[in-house]
Amino acid sequence: MNRAVRRRPTLATTTALALLGALSLTACTGGVVPATGKARAADPASRPDLKPFYGQRLEWTGCATDGYECASLTVPLDYARPGNGRTFVLPVARATATGPARRIGSLVYNPGGPGAGGVSSLQEGMDESFGAAVRARFDIVSFDPRGVGGSVPALTCEPAEEEPEDGTEEEPVEETSEEASDAVAPLYPRTEADRSAAASGARTAAEDCEEHSGPILRHVGTEDAARDLDVLRAALGERRLTYLGWSYGTSLGTSYAEQFPRRVRAMVLDGAIDPSLDWRQRVISQSAGFRRSVDDYAEQCAEIAGDSCPGASPQEIRALIERLYQRAEREPLPVAEDSAYAEYGGMDATAVLDAVSLAMYTPEDQWEPLSEALREADQGDATKLGALDEEETPETDTSEEEEQEDDTPDTPEPPADNSAAALTAVNCLDVPHPRSLRPYWDALAPADKAAGVYGTAGVTAELTCRDWPSGGRGPHRVDADGVPPVLVVGTTGDPSTPYEESVSLAEQFPQGMLLTYEGLGHTAYGRGDACVTAKVDAYLVKRERVGPGATC
């Protein structure tokens, strides 16, 4: 879909909604595809062509951020031909156990996405999202998946900026308001012209990714990332994997459990994605989740955001949001000159919808600034609305650094953010999409009925995957015989990974367990609820089971 399925922790954030990209678990037929038989080697390291990878031991050095250690992991580009010399080199980071005398081992996590870098999230404080009991007994470890963040090579769908041959800087071409207005795309493309424009834009996006990342595009899917996770397990010296995946990380964990069920020690999947849904079902599921969350915002705004709410009643708030969507479809909403949206002539309807949707992830942090931004946008200035997904850069005193410049080694530049490209690439590759346009147009009316503009915008975003290389298995129920009990955590008011999908995933796992968190926002563990923390920590440390009907 057009929204990232990604972890939004209170303490660390690496999230931005991508305007391109599609979250889909899809088959051309629209039915559930039986799981195909898989050859599960008892020990993949026994394969001669994989031994060099499984035989690695990580060499830890200090990260750019104090208190963390970093290393690199080498994995084959193509697991079908691991000996051809082509590889990914993946960054890895860890926060060592706070109670080393009682250390159990390493706990690997994925923060979500696809497209979120684990290394940057850890160095931004993601280890603090884990309970004290877990931090004491485990090294908290994460990595940048293949193609993501600091991975070498990394995905890109954007051409490199070219300098003029004479060395002078070219003046940017400013788009006039009239031109910007002509480029506005509707949230529900009804006319042939609108649909043709949407299909053309999606095709161009896919062609850009093929042009700039073609050699690796077919090798960045979740199944291969799960194989990398097993190589990481071995490189960490762990016989079995302890894992926690938030949001998209549940897909990565599920794939690992299917391929290496007897390599799992303990696994928590928080904010689950149901692999049995086809692409239309997935669009409607997630879009309906966002629509319900926006309704929750209208109903409960006063309780959480107080006097900042942009309306005196739920009806007024809903009417304001709808009014902004309609205005932005006619003409982009005005923003200040220093806004990231200024070069596009303002915020179009898709940008407004994404900003509103993004604010549903953590109501306790985002509903108050959203309310203020909506009020100002309704009054003619959408600058704050466009800035909701911008991360703050802390100010630092560089005087001491400048004095020590000659004595301090250079700190490597952080990798460019390629989360939008990775979001599109992984989701489109994971499961094949219909190649003809008709299934997308046929999905618009049901999506509109189920989720309004959130649904139709989601369907339109799926068009990028129509021209994508095929590579995934298609919709299927979990096939993980032999895996120990897996704990699935579902939040009843989750906008991005609806609660029903967590219920379904827990039922699909052999001995699957469901922990229900009755609350709002995306995912549960690490957001401060003591009940959730206690139950998840007890499972990870002691492997204590959660009983049927467990609720926090």
Image (spheres, helix red, strand yellow):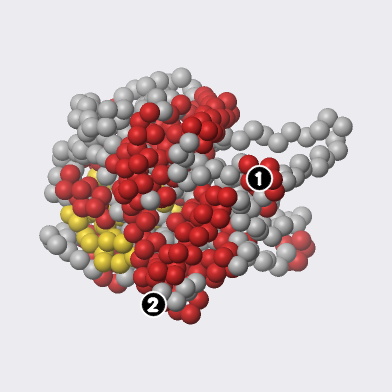
* Residue 150 percent coordinates (x, y): 54, 42
Question: Image quadrant for the N terminus?
Answer: top left
Residue at the (17%, 54%) spot, across then down = 513
Cα–Cα gap, marks 2 and 1: 38 Å
Give the quarter of the image for residue 220.
Answer: top left
From the viewer's side, name the closer residue of 87 and 250.
250
Instruction: Give the secondary structure at mark 2.
Output: helix
* Residue 453 percent coordinates (x, y): 42, 50
Give the quarter of the image for residue 437.
Answer: top left
Please tell me whether mark 2 or mark 1 is closer to you in this view: 1
Q: Is residue 61 visible?
A: no
Q: Is residue 356 visible?
A: yes
Would you name the residue on which mark 1 appears?
180
Seen in the image, is 461 located left or right of residue 62?
A: left
Question: Image quadrant for the C terminus?
Answer: bottom left
Instruction: Tell me the kind of residue under disc 2.
Output: Glu
From the viewer's side, name the closer residue of 435 and 166.
435
Residue at the (34%, 22%) spot, across then down = 48
* Residue 60 percent coordinates (x, y): 49, 48
Residue at the (27%, 61%) spot, across then down = 492
Answer yes or no: do the residues labelled 2 and 1 have beta carbons within 8 Å?
no
- Decide: few, some or many residues near mark 2? Use Cα within 10 Å; few <14, some 14-19, many ≥20: few
Instruction: Give the secondary structure at mark 1.
Output: helix
Give the vertical position of 233 relative to 29 (above or below): below
Would you name the residue on which mark 2 appears?
303
From the viewer's side, name the closer residue of 397 and 57.
397
- Decide: few, some or many residues near mark 1? Use Cα within 10 Å; few <14, some 14-19, many ≥20: some
Seen in the image, is 209 located left or right of residue 141?
A: right
